[in-house]
Image (spheres, rainbow, N blue to C red):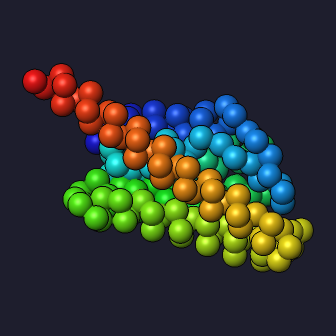
């Protein structure tokens, strides 16, 4: 994958994360960035998913929630990397890799929030259900977007 495509995906992740923000308890927010991260990983592979997910989401956090940017860089980078592992996989693993990425992302946010001095255990527990929902919707939306893209590509080939 070309570097400029990865840069474009990084910008798309940042914009989709910032475009619609629905606040949740503990200071975070729902967004559409995870949908784009899962799509980017499935389309471009692990490196593209990791860079676009980590950097694009961290940029969005720098603008909105700068305290979380380092945690987001790691959490969303891991999500993108794992989703990208699904690109080269088939069958069960094509879905298992992005799901694992979502689980790891939720775990990273949970531990990161818990150990953050200004938030702690209560915020980590409060953010846990919204983070699970965010990861689930990101997986479903990203897979649907990738399936639509694949179908369109197959129609153009025939």
Q: Number of numbered discs present?
A: 0
In the image, is residue 24 above or below residue 150?
below
Q: What's the residue at 30%, 59% (across, down)?
A: 94
- Tell whether 153 sits left or right of 36: left
- Tell whether 123 sits left or right of 140: right
Q: What's the residue at 28%, 53% (across, down)?
A: 87
Q: Which of the two residues, 53 or 156, is positioned nearer the viewer here?
A: 156
Q: What's the residue at 46%, 37% (across, down)?
A: 9
Residue 73: image x %, image y %? 60, 57
Residue 104: image x %, image y %? 54, 70
Is residue 71 visible in the rendered structure shown here? no
Q: Quadrant of the C terminus?
A: top left
Tell me the quarter of the picture where residue 105 sits.
bottom right
Q: Residue furthest right?
A: 118
Q: Quadrant of the N terminus?
A: top left
Residue 147: image x %, image y %? 33, 40
Tell me the quarter of the picture where residue 64 sits.
top right
In the image, is residue 147 above or below residue 48?
above
Is residue 103 visible in the rendered structure shown here? yes
- Tell whether 117 sits left or right of 71: right
In the image, is residue 141 above or below residue 70?
above
Q: Which of the two residues, 122 or 3, is positioned nearer the viewer here?
A: 122
- Tell whether 5 sits left or right of 64: left
């Amino acid at each position: 994958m070309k570097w400029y495509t990865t840069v474009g995906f990084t910008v798309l992740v940042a914009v989709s994360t910032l475009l619609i923000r629905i606040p949740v308890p503990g200071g975070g927010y729902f967004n559409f960035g995870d949908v784009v991260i899962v799509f980017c990983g499935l389309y471009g592979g692990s490196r593209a998913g990791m860079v676009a997910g980590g950097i694009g989401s961290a940029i969005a956090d720098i603008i909105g929630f700068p305290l979380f940017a380092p945690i987001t860089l790691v959490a969303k980078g891991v999500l993108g990397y794992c989703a990208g592992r699904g690109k080269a996989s088939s069958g069960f693993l094509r879905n298992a890799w992005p799901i694992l990425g979502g689980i790891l992302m939720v775990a990273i946010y949970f531990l990161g929030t818990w150990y953050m001095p200004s938030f702690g255990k209560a915020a980590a527990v409060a953010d846990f259900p919204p983070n699970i929902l965010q990861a689930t919707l990101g997986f479903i939306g990203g897979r649907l977007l990738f399936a639509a893209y694949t179908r369109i590509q197959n129609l153009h080939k025939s």
